């Protein structure tokens, strides 16, 4: 993977001094090869940062930073893989340079299993241009649906501990039911309902889900409530874990089986780019659930990983590694103004997971881009 001019040639794998497997104590020879399965569309994301304001019509804006990386469903796949989960992705890739780059970045760079993915001849990669400014983002995308596979349907999902799905009102995905029947725990989020109906019954795949993770606005509209916590309790009648993200207030969760609740405040950070933060949050919660952590620890970990991600730009680029989590934990405990007792009360569970070596903070990232080729061999 190449880097932009002037950046250190350091990869995320170099940053990690130890391979952390959050499920190591639970693994058995009879386990499936795959921890998490997901499917969807991979975009090439081109991200511009360092914009002082939104672009103005009829003018040219210069960004101080630019990078590119796999996006779309690749954001979630990368976040899961960097947290040590064995991740399988079924997706279509264009046979252009962008598709080749995304495939290599995910398979070789992140260790994601692409055995169920395919390269589509004559199909170009979908592209998203994202512009980050003032803590927000504006995106422009272009692409076409990949043509269907001739003959039999693809042989997915594989046997897995979990699968991640994005629910669409009025539409069910047959693979979700198949994955659930195969023993996978289904974790689902949802997008904005452009129809305005907000009909919870229209989310037909919700019946297969272990956890549902909408944001506060989505949760309240689907449950016809005026409080995100009340919405979480209403959703807990439908799924085992109802998790409602509260933006700057953190997140609230209800265990529908036991009635247990948990609420964890957000970590205050200087946000550079929120792209992919929701995916990182879900990946953190999936990790904690599969590892059977207490509900509050799952929320705290998900919130921490999301907070670390918004301090970097890009979707899959920003997903934190265990090395970055360890560096943050070492840094924050000695930071002036922090309450050491409160920190340890909330994040003590990290001690048994993290690499113990001292790490500098903040860590510098390599920034992948398109356009450079390796020098020819002499």
Image (cartoon, rainbow, N blue to C red):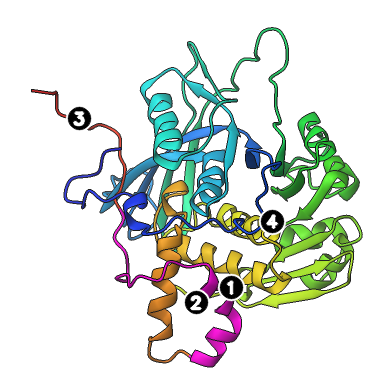
Q: Give the structural element (helix, strand or loop) at label 1.
A: helix
| Residue drawn where x is 81% and y is 40% of the image | 180
Quarter of the N terminus within the rendering: top left
Relative to the observer, which residue lies in front, 100 or 60? Answer: 100
Relative to the observer, which residue lies in front, 134 or 28? Answer: 28
The residue that mark 4 highlights is 290
Separation of disc 1 and disc 4 at Cα?
A: 26 Å
Residue 127 at least partly seen: yes
Residue 271 at least partly seen: no
User: Do the residues bearing badges 1 and 4 touch, measured as CB atoms within 8 Å?
Assistant: no
Among numbered discs 3 and 4, the one appearing first in the sequence: 4
Residue 253 lies left or right of residue 316; in this view the side is: right
Quarter of the C terminus within the rendering: top left
Among numbered discs 1 and 3, the one appearing first in the sequence: 1
**Is residue 354 part of the magenta span, yes or no?**
yes
| Residue drawn where x is 87% and y is 48% of the image | 199
The residue that mark 2 highlights is 268
User: Do the residues bearing badges 1 and 2 touch, measured as CB atoms within 8 Å?
Assistant: yes
The residue that mark 1 highlights is 248
Q: Give the structural element (helix, strand or loop) at label 4.
A: helix
Q: Give the structural element (helix, strand or loop) at label 3.
A: loop
């Amino acid at each position: 993977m190449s880097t932009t001019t002037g950046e250190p040639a350091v990869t995320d794998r170099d940053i990690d001094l130890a391979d952390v497997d959050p499920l190591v104590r639970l693994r058995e020879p009879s386990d499936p090869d795959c921890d998490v399965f997901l499917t969807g569309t991979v975009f090439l994301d081109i991200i511009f940062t360092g914009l002082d304001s939104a672009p103005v019509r009829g003018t040219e804006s210069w960004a101080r930073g630019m990078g590119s990386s796999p996006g779309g469903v690749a954001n979630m796949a990368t976040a899961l893989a960097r947290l040590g989960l064995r991740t399988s992705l079924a997706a279509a890739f264009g046979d252009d340079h962008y598709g080749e780059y995304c495939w290599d970045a995910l398979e070789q760079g992140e260790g994601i299993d692409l055995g169920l993915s395919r390269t589509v001849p004559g199909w170009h990669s979908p592209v998203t241009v994202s512009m980050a400014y003032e803590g927000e983002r504006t995106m422009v995308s272009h692409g076409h649906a990949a043509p269907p596979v001739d003959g039999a349907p693809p042989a997915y999902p594989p046997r897995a501990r979990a699968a991640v799905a994005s629910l669409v009102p009025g539409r069910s995905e047959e693979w979700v039911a198949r994955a659930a029947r195969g023993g996978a725990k289904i974790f689902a989020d949802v997008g904005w309902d452009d129809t305005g109906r907000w009909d919870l019954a229209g989310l037909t795949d919700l019946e297969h889900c272990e956890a549902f993770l909408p944001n506060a606005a989505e949760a309240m509209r689907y449950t016809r409530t005026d409080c995100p916590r009340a919405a979480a309790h209403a959703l807990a009648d439908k799924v085992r874990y109802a998790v409602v993200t509260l933006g700057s207030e953190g997140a609230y969760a209800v265990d529908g089986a036991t009635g247990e609740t948990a609420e964890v405040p957000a970590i205050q950070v200087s946000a550079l780019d929120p792209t992919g933060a929701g995916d990182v949050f879900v990946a953190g919660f999936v990790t904690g659930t599969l590892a059977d952590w207490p509900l509050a620890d799952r929320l705290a970990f998900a919130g921490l990983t999301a907070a670390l991600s918004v301090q970097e730009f890009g979707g899959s680029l920003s997903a934190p590694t265990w090395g970055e989590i360890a560096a943050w934990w070492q840094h924050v405990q000695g930071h002036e103004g922090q309450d050491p007792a409160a920190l340890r009360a909330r994040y003590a569970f990290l001690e048994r997971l993290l690499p113990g070596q001292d790490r500098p903070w903040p860590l510098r990232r390599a920034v992948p881009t398109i356009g450079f080729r390796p020098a020819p061999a002499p």
